Image (cartoon, rainbow, N blue to C red):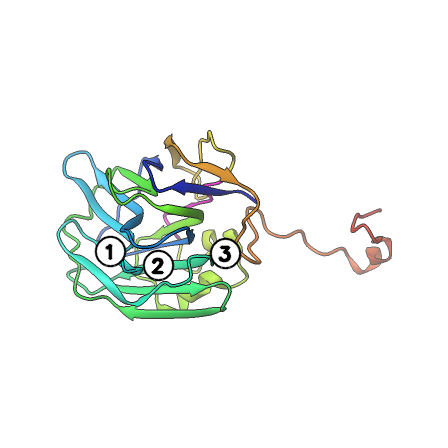
């Protein structure tokens, strides 16, 4: 399947209309970095007046970090091994609240999580009009690959975050127990886009740089539609070695 490649130099995708984050939030992505040692953001959420209002990504030290326009908060753990795919996420309750950070390593099949280094305010997280994937308003561009990205207007519980790695299907994000406001497969349909929000009402309006590759999927991940249901028992004898069906 296709994933979007960001080279760390002025590569981003802008979506509009955006989703609004009314203080309580969860943002998550399936991502694979290609280097470390620099600040790189996966999400940059902006409005027309004040510019950047919320960001989520990696610190130069490879901790996760989130910014509310004033304060920068980090996870206590490091997202190591840039050769692996990861699910990374941040959640925050409404009001001045400390975020929680999560990371799932596909190769290790293991989660780690931590409370953030301090509280984030939500006063600036209203009326967002632009969602930029892979950039941060001119700096902190992502160097890596993004397979799936999503957002919720609530702080998912730990079990709900960890459900994002259950069955490993994009449709599980769309049909999550808590309904998301935005889910995209940024590598689909192709480099030129537009990239459609799988919730059904938000498209990309600008693709700057980036490429698409089909040879580096997250392990075990299924994109797009649900897997095809099995044949009825009466028809199983018609399945041949090639895997094709004959009825």
Q: Which residues are magenta?
A: 180-187
Q: Which residue is mark 1?
A: 66
Q: Is residue 183 magenta?
A: yes
Coordinates of residue 234 in the picture (x, y in percent): 84, 58
Q: Which residue is mark 3?
A: 172
Q: Quadrant of residue 116?
A: bottom left
* Image label count: 3
Q: Which residue is mark 2?
A: 89
Q: Secondary structure at mark 1?
A: strand
Q: Is residue 45 above or below residue 239?
A: above
- Between discs 2 and 3, the one toward the N terminus: 2
Q: Is residue 69 above or below residue 13?
A: below
- Between discs 3 and 1, the one toward the N terminus: 1
Structural crowding at the residue carrying mark 3, measured as other residues with C-alpha within 10 Å and reported as few (<14), some (14–19) or many (≥20): some
Q: Secondary structure at mark 3?
A: helix
Q: Residue at x 20, y 65 (%)?
A: 98
Q: Residue at x 28, y 51 (%)?
A: 38
Observer-nearest of 34 and 57: 34
How far apart in space, not on screen, are marks 3 and 1 (Cα)? 25 Å
């Amino acid at each position: 399947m296709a994933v979007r490649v960001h080279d760390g130099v002025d590569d981003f995708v802008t979506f509009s209309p955006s989703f609004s984050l009314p203080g309580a939030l969860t943002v998550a992505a399936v991502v694979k970095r290609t280097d470390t040692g620099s600040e790189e953001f996966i999400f940059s959420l902006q409005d027309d007046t004040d510019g950047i209002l919320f960001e989520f990504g990696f610190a130069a030290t490879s901790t996760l970090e989130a910014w509310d326009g004033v304060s920068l908060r980090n996870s206590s753990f490091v997202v190591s091994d840039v050769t692996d795919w990861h699910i990374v996420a941040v959640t925050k309750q409404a009001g001045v609240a400390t975020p929680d950070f999560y990371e799932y390593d596909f190769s290790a099949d293991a989660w780690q999580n931590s409370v953030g280094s301090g509280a984030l305010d939500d006063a600036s997280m209203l009326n967002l009009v632009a969602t930029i994937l892979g950039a941060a308003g001119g700096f902190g561009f992502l160097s890596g690959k993004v397979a799936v990205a999503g957002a919720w207007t609530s702080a998912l519980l730990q079990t709900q975050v960890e459900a994002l790695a259950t069955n490993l299907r994009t449709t599980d994000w769309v049909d999550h127990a808590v309904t998301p406001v935005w889910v995209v497969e940024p590598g689909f349909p192709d480099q030129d886009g537009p990239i459609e929000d799988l919730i059904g009402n938000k498209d990309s309006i600008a693709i700057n740089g980036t490429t698409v590759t089909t040879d580096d999927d997250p392990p075990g991940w299924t994109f797009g539609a649900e897997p095809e249901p099995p044949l009825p028992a009466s028809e199983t004898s018609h399945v041949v070695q090639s895997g094709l069906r004959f009825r």
